[in-house]
Amino acid sequence: MKIQKFLTIGLTLLFFSQCSFANECKNTILAKKYAQMYRDDQALRGRYINILEMENRKENIDFKEKEQLEIEITKTDDANEIELDKLIGLCGWPGNLDGNRASLSALAIIQHADLDYQLRHFAMVKAANQRREIPSDRFVLLVDRILVRQGKLQLYGTEFEYGSNNVAPIEDPKNLNARRKKMGLPPIN
């Protein structure tokens, strides 16, 4: 009797956990989650970029506001990374969900993460690019960011030196525009 009751409870829990998993991975729910994660990712970055530009022009900035934005952006990034890992673990890479908006949301989260997180997800992003779920002109942003963070020369000229308008050093500058054209980027003069 006890074994039968135990099995019934166990099977019931398994059933409901599977229902929860199925609900979590429904396209409409998943698309909304990715859209919200992207909105969260972008919400504070616009103001933060404005502050960095003012700082670069040697204008007065509110250092407390800058510091607070950095803290909030880090919290948001950390939460998004945890949620992204959860969603990918449960449902797989978002693919062409919601057009390719969900994949682009995932890419933005990975792009804004630390180097270790980027490297852990790079093969997945590269495969998504090869399946045309992430356009090449977006994929190269992650490629260059990883290379620059590793202290290497970037390939496509999408990364700038911190705090300046100077493009970070480029591998084989003579062939830069040919590489950019192949990936759907305009030339750099």
Image: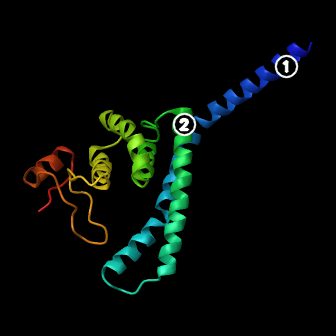
In the image, taking residue 122 as reference, residue 87 lies left or right, namely right
Q: Position of residue 170 (x, y in %)?
A: 17, 56
Q: Would you identify the image quadrant in which residue 13 lies?
A: top right
Quadrant the N terminus occupies:
top right
Do the CB atoms of the residues marked 2 and 1 lie less than 8 Å apart? no
Q: Residue furthest right?
A: 1
> Could you classify mark 1 by the number of other residues whose Cα lies within 10 Å: few (under 14), some (14-19), or many (20 or more)?
few
In the drawing, what numbered circle is on residue 144? none
User: What's the residue at 77%, 20% (across, down)?
Assistant: 11
Amino acid type at mark 1: Phe
Q: Position of residue 188 (x, y in %)?
A: 14, 60
Badge 2 or badge 1: first in the primary sequence: 1
In the image, taking residue 178 as reference, residue 120 lies left or right, namely right
Q: Position of residue 22 (x, y in %)?
A: 63, 30
Please name the residue that numbered disc 2 is placed on: 27
> Could you classify mark 2 by the number of other residues whose Cα lies within 10 Å: few (under 14), some (14-19), or many (20 or more)?
some
Question: Comparing marks 2 and 1, which lies closer to the viewer?
Answer: 1
Residue 124 or 34: which is nearer the viewer?
A: 124
Is any atom of residue 148 visible in this view?
yes
Quadrant the C terminus occupies:
bottom left
Is any atom of residue 36 visible in this view?
no
Number of numbered markers: 2
Please name the residue that numbered disc 1 is placed on: 6
In the image, taking residue 16 as reference, residue 116 lies left or right, namely left
Can you say whether 14 is above or below 133 in the image? above
In the image, taking residue 175 as reference, residue 131 lies left or right, namely right
Q: Tell me how far mark 2 sits from mark 1, CA to CA.
A: 34 Å
Amino acid type at mark 2: Asn
